[in-house]
Image: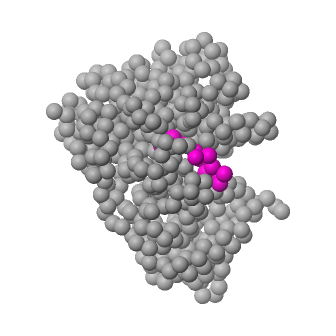
Amino acid sequence: MARFILALDQGTTSSRAILFNDAGKPVSVAQQEFPQHFPRPGWVEHDPLDIWRSQRDTALAVLAQAGASPSDVAAIGITNQRETTVLWDRRTGEPVHNAIVWQCRRTAALCDTIKADGFDATLRAKTGLVTDAYFSGTKVAWLLDNVPGVRARAEAGELAFGTVDTWLLWNLSGGALHITDVTNAGRTLLYNIYTGDWDDEILAYLKIPRGLLPEVRPSSQVYGETVTNPFGTAIPLAGMAGDQQAAMFGQACLKPGMAKNTYGTGSFVLLNTGTEGVPSNSGLLTTIAWQLSGEPVIYALEGSVFIAGAAVQWLRDGLQIINSAPEIESLAASVEGTDGVYFVPAFVGLGAPYWDPYARGTLVGITRGTTRAHIARAALNAIALQSRDVLDAMHADSGISLSALRVDGGAAANNLLMQIQADVLGVPVQRPAVTETTALGAAYLAGLAVGFWPGVEALEAAWSVERTFEPRMSESERAALLEGWRRAIERARDWANGE
């Protein structure tokens, strides 16, 4: 009897594979980095073959580590860096160009044109997204218009488009499956998240042939199976979701009003809004959270904070006031507070809910008594306060009040930061026993599809808290902190605009 679910976690700088047992615990992990390509300033690319090879090799390595055979695997689930765009030849499987990575800004001018045409309102109404180079649609248009011969081949039906989930599924199935799931489709800027179909009006505007696009399926469903190479046997391919949605599912945020925050370089906050897609008037994205086979689509509001862990990296590498990122906890804990210092880490502008590209990093409130410890504590405060801003915007859009926040990602290991987050929000912060939530979400989606877990109730029961951080701050302290933060934000905003 199959004992494991294999999760493939394909990220921006590395590919990982994790084998999970039926208790939802990781049994073995393998990771492999792959090269990043920067052909011009602001451009970011990956070789799709590097993505495939590194993911294949980690999958085989994780089985070898566990002493498991492919026949021990009940199903494979995939989670992936979202929005990254691949075009390939349907017959040979050869990419026609490097993958254009979600970070790439080469289509910013096209996005400006879309806004000037007023078409951005149509995109917002249908896709729940803002018009930005971040998303896949303008990347596909760029490839069609700028790679010689690609448009003619696409219109002749010779090429296939996919985000990374689709590219991996294609290769795992030996070219038999050209499929994406609703979460990844919903990040392309081409998919109507309310009607559940590729949108002909958007495709016509961007001049993208519908025949390029994959079939859209639920996030949890048996799509097909692996070919004998590379595993030597057929394994069901049964779950897919973009990384942030997979993390939300892995955190068992299964009911409306439940939210998770992933603390990485930036941080991503997602709030489950149930079967209703809530349009945002507060600078958030309306996105598909997941869809289980035969069930309605579940929606979420998503807010991105550009700089979270990267603020700590700057203290280490830029100011050099710490030698390693974990040092910030003890340094910040050596003082009771910031002594009135606020740090707004708007190094690349501000993301949700401000969306101010001209904001810049700001340290305010400095006196002769300010020490590196106060600045370190102000950096942790900033991470928590930015997340509070996003959650306030979510409340304004949805009317949903947060009862607790589930956390994951590297910085979630920082106990002081998690306590500050609870204090700033005024609700408990829950850190799970299993922090590999992105891969776990992909495993859960695949496992549900093949009956490895009987239902979502089993996933809720399996989710457990390693530690809960209860708010300790008084209402008056919190109000004063938030008022100071708002003043600091105002001083950071529009700084690079020269006005």
Q: In which quarter of the image is residue 495?
A: bottom right
Part of the protein shown in magenta: 278-289
Along the line of sight, the residue nearer the viewer: 271 or 225: 271
Q: Residue at x 27, y 44 (%)?
A: 20
The vertical placement of 90 against 193, above or below, is above
Along the line of sight, the residue nearer the viewer: 64 or 459: 459
Magenta stretch: includes residue 304 = no
Residue 172 screen position, x and y as percent: 37, 26
Magenta stretch: includes residue 286 = yes
Q: In which quadrant is the N terminus drawn? A: top left
Q: In which quarter of the image is residue 155?
A: top right
Horizontal side, residue 473 vs residue 307: left or right: left
Horizontal side, residue 407 vs residue 314: left or right: left
Q: Residue at x 45, y 36 (%)?
A: 296
Residue 283 makes an appearance in the image: yes
The number of callouts visible is 0
The vertical placement of 83 against 162, above or below, is below
Along the line of sight, the residue nearer the viewer: 401 or 34: 401
Residue 345 screen position, x and y as percent: 61, 64
Q: In which quadrant is the C terminus drawn? A: bottom right
Q: Residue at x 48, y 46 (%)?
A: 274
